[in-house]
Image (tube, rainbow, N blue to C red):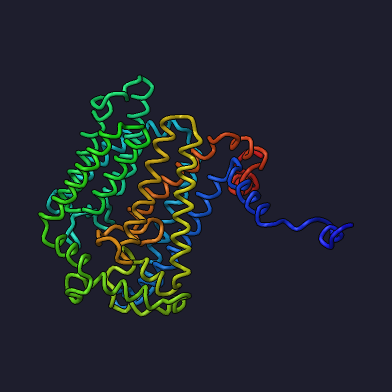
């Protein structure tokens, strides 16, 4: 005797079959590739939209045009996206070849920040090099440099079997990372210091550092961060404001309080795109450090959960790449880049919703700023290149045929068909 579902052409899939089908999708060779690409595109689109919304009022008052920062962000994106595409097509040996030049360039650029007349300070930190029409933030390049250099160094040591003892494991990785951290610390940039230390710890974790050594290094990092907080009065004020949110809401905790007001006023679905009130000179740095608060106000809880979900999927994809590839450098670089982007996002969002102290670092791919956007896009392009090295990925890409960019170039006669 047949059921109605069978008479209609087949049996309805139950919850178990749906779960099996979903797991099957995650097991496909190109899952990591499409997750990284999809999350990157969605976060970039959201970021460009929110930069326009968050900066429109302030820029209309300052420059007479609501599109000033939007146009600049679109320009940085137009530069970063070809870099991301190029990175996605580079071989692993090219990333390894870039490690030492990028490290040297980062050290020189960070030293330039400390030169009077070249370095520019804002918000208690000296982060930018003033080059006239443009200002760059070398510490963003230092994150990428540490990922590539640390991964290349540890991969070479792994090939030589030098990772079984603590001294070969830490030298020269720890001194090299220490130079970058010291230069950033001299600029009073605690947020970037935390990210660099996170990359350092992630590399040690992936390479399999002994438990005692890892705990000892982690304790040293906590001690270093505590010292940085104590020696700067404004950092102590931020910490006390975090520990006592109901304290002085008009001075030391003003930004955090306004950020919470913005997120809370969004409710479940938000006030609507462009309808937020926090950007009307209530919330400082709405287009950079606190853009997540504008997302919460205008898109509500649903919008914030979507952003959180995008970074969660990005973390899953990055760690999946690191787990599935066989090359030690690829595994280390994928884990380091993922830790950099995801931990920075967690610190930024945590500061906005009041569960972490304010550190002044942007939300990757969403906040305004070309110095942060371009290295982040290059790192994501690198993850795409690594995703192609997963088992079965190249065969799946070959079966899929040429991508839209190659097809467009072929149509224009600029590439082979």
Across and down, in percent, residue 197 comes to 26, 44
State whether residue 325 is above or below residue 34: above
The residue drawn where x is 23% and y is 25% is 167
127 displayed left or right of 5 = left
What is the quadrant of residue 359 in the picture?
A: bottom left
Across and down, in percent, residue 368 comes to 35, 62
Closer to the camera in the image, 409 or 226: 226
Outermost residue to the right: 1
- Count up the numbered dots: 0
State whether residue 370 is above or below residue 111: below
Across and down, in percent, residue 120 comes to 18, 57
- Quadrant containing the N terminus in the rendered view: bottom right
Outermost residue to the front: 1
351 displayed left or right of 295 = left
178 displayed left or right of 290 = left
Closer to the camera in the image, 173 or 264: 264
Across and down, in percent, residue 353 comes to 33, 67
The residue drawn where x is 30% and y is 31% is 210
The residue drawn where x is 48% and y is 63% is 306
- Quadrant containing the C terminus in the rendered view: top right
The residue drawn where x is 25% and y is 54% is 191
């Amino acid at each position: 005797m047949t059921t109605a579902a069978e008479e209609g052409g087949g049996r309805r899939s139950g919850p178990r079959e749906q779960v099996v089908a979903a797991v099957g999708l995650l097991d496909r060779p190109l899952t990591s590739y499409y997750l990284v690409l999809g999350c990157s595109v969605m976060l970039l689109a959201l970021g460009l939209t929110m930069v326009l919304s968050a900066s429109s009022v302030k820029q209309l008052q300052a420059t007479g045009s609501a599109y000033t920062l939007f146009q600049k962000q679109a320009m940085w994106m137009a530069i970063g996206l070809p870099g991301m595409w190029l990175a996605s097509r580079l071989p692993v040996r090219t990333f390894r070849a870039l490690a030492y030049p990028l490290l040297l360039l980062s050290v020189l650029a960070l030293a330039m920040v400390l030169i009077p007349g070249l370095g520019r300070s804002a918000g208690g930190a000296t982060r930018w090099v003033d080059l006239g029409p443009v200002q760059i933030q070398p510490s963003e390049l230092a994150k990428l440099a540490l990922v590539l250099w640390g991964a290349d160094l540890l991969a070479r040591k792994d090939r030589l079997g030098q990772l079984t003892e603590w001294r070969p494991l830490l030298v020269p990785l720890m001194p090299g990372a220490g130079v970058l951290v010291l230069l950033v610390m001299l600029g009073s940039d605690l947020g970037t210091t935390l990210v660099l230390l996170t990359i350092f710890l992630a590399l040690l974790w992936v390479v399999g550092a002994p438990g005692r050594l890892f705990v000892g290094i982690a304790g040293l990092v906590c001690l270093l961060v505590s010292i940085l907080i104590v020696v700067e009065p404004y950092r102590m004020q931020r910490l006390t404001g975090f520990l006592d949110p109901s304290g002085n809401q008009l001075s030391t905790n003003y930004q955090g309080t306004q950020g919470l007001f913005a997120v809370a006023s969004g409710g479940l679905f938000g006030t609507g795109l462009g309808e937020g009130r926090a950007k009307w000179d209530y919330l400082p740095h709405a287009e950079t450090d606190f853009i997540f608060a504008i997302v919460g106000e205008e898109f509500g809880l649903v919008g914030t959960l979507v952003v959180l979900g995008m970074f969660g999927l990005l973390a899953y994809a990055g760690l999946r790449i690191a787990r599935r590839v066989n090359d030690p450098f690829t595994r280390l670089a994928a884990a380091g880049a993922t830790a950099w982007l995801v931990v920075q996002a967690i610190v930024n969002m945590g500061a906005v919703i009041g569960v972490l102290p304010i550190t002044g670092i942007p939300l990757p791919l969403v906040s305004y700023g070309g110095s942060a956007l371009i290295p982040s896009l290059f790192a994501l392009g690198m993850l795409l290149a690594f995703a192609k090295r997963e088992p079965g990925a190249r065969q799946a890409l070959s079966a899929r045929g040429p991508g839209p960019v190659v097809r467009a170039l072929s149509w224009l006669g600029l590439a082979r068909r």
